[in-house]
Each structure stands twice: as C-alpha cells, then as structure tokens.
Image (cartoon, helix red, strand yellow):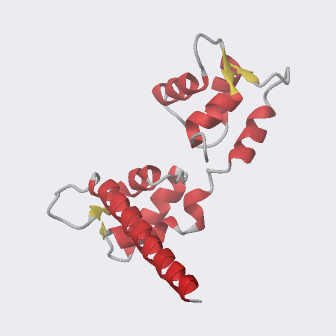
C-alpha cells in the first residue's frame, strides 16, 4: 500500500514536471512572435502565424474572421493563455485532416498510382478553395515533388503539408 502511494506521488511529480516542460516550450515558441521581447503578448494580426507554429492549420478566411472578431471586441493583443484557448477552438484544426486531404487529392489521380500531373494540380488549385499567388502555387507544387519527379506525389505532399505524424 505504501509503495503504491509512493508510486502515485512519483507519477504526479512527473506529470507536473512534464507539464511545466511543455508550457516552457510553448512559451519559447510564442516568444518568437512578439514584436517586443519585453511584452507578454503578440499583436492579434500575428494569430495565423502563431497557430501554424503551434501545429494548427486554419484557413486564412477563418483566421481573418476570428482576428476581426477579436479586434471588434477591443482585443488587439493576445497573451499565451489567449492563444492556448484559441487553439482549442474547432476552426483552428479544420484543415489538419490527413485522410480527408489525401482522399480529396486522390480524386484527381486518374491513374490511381498516387500522383497528380503538375498542370492538372495547378488548374485544380487555381479554381478550388482560397486563391493562391503563382509563387505560392509554385511552392506548393515543389512541396509535392521529391527528387526529380515530374508528377506530384500525393503522400509526400500530405506529409510535407501536415507533417509526418499529423
């Protein structure tokens, strides 16, 4: 019984230590976006960048809408706590669905070999979703090419966009 209690105390101490380490890492990441290191906040217009750095991938439209809502409410500065609350909002993860993204891209894989022709992808990206500049589109295409491919590798593109463990 005493050994069991000691084990629980050790587990609780480890959990607290782990939580403190995570909070420290999040604070370090958050600090990179401060306009002035002496401040404990970021400007609300940096929200999209911060969310992306924290592993979220909201649409630009959703981010802009949320920033406008915050500004309308008189909130022009965000603390780490504010950002952590925003991260829990469902709109911040809407674009992080690995399987959904892969399924959507596979619909344009006419040969069912896991690749999309570059020109087909360019046309697709120009007509569906949020508009991309030519440079953004070129960058996105490059993300999907590994080595010297002439077609976009769907799995490779998904891994590059969402990370290997997303």
Measured as percent of width and height from the top left, residue 93 is found at 59, 57
Classify 36 as above or below 157.
below
Measured as percent of width and height from the top left, residue 66 is found at 47, 65
Measured as percent of width and height from the top left, residue 29 is found at 34, 54
Considering every residue shown, the one lying at the far front of the view is 2
Classify 103 as above or below 46.
above
Considering every residue shown, the one lying at the far right of the view is 111
Question: Which residue sits at x=51%, y=75%?
Answer: 11
Considering every residue shown, the one lying at the far left of the view is 38
Query: Going by the image, does 8 lie left or right of 67?
Result: right
Question: Which residue sits at x=37%, y=72%?
Answer: 81
Query: Going by the image, does 12 lie left or right of 70?
Result: right
Q: Quadrant of residue 74?
A: bottom left
Q: Which image quarter holds the N terminus?
A: bottom right
Which one is in front, 6 or 117? Answer: 6
Question: Which residue sits at x=62%, y=50%?
Answer: 96
Query: Going by the image, does 153 lie left or right of 83?
Result: right
Measured as percent of width and height from the top left, residue 156 is found at 64, 29
Question: Which residue sits at x=37%, y=69%?
Answer: 20
């Amino acid at each position: 019984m005493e050994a069991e209690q000691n084990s629980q105390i050790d587990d609780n101490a480890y959990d607290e230590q782990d939580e403190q380490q995570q909070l420290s890492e999040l604070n370090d990441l958050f600090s990179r976006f401060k306009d002035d290191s002496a401040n404990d906040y970021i400007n609300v217009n940096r929200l999209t960048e911060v969310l992306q750095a924290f592993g979220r991938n909201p649409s630009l439209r959703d981010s802009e809408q949320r920033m406008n809502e915050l500004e309308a409410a008189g909130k022009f500065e965000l603390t780490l706590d504010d950002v952590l609350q925003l991260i829990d909002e469902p709109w911040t993860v809407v674009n992080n669905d690995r399987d959904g993204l892969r399924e959507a891209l596979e619909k344009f894989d006419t040969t069912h070999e896991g690749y999309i022709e570059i020109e087909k992808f360019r046309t697709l990206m120009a007509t569906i979703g949020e508009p991309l500049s030519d440079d953004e589109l070129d960058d996105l295409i490059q993300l999907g090419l590994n080595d010297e491919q002439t077609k976009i590798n769907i799995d490779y593109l998904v891994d590059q966009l969402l990370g290997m463990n997303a």
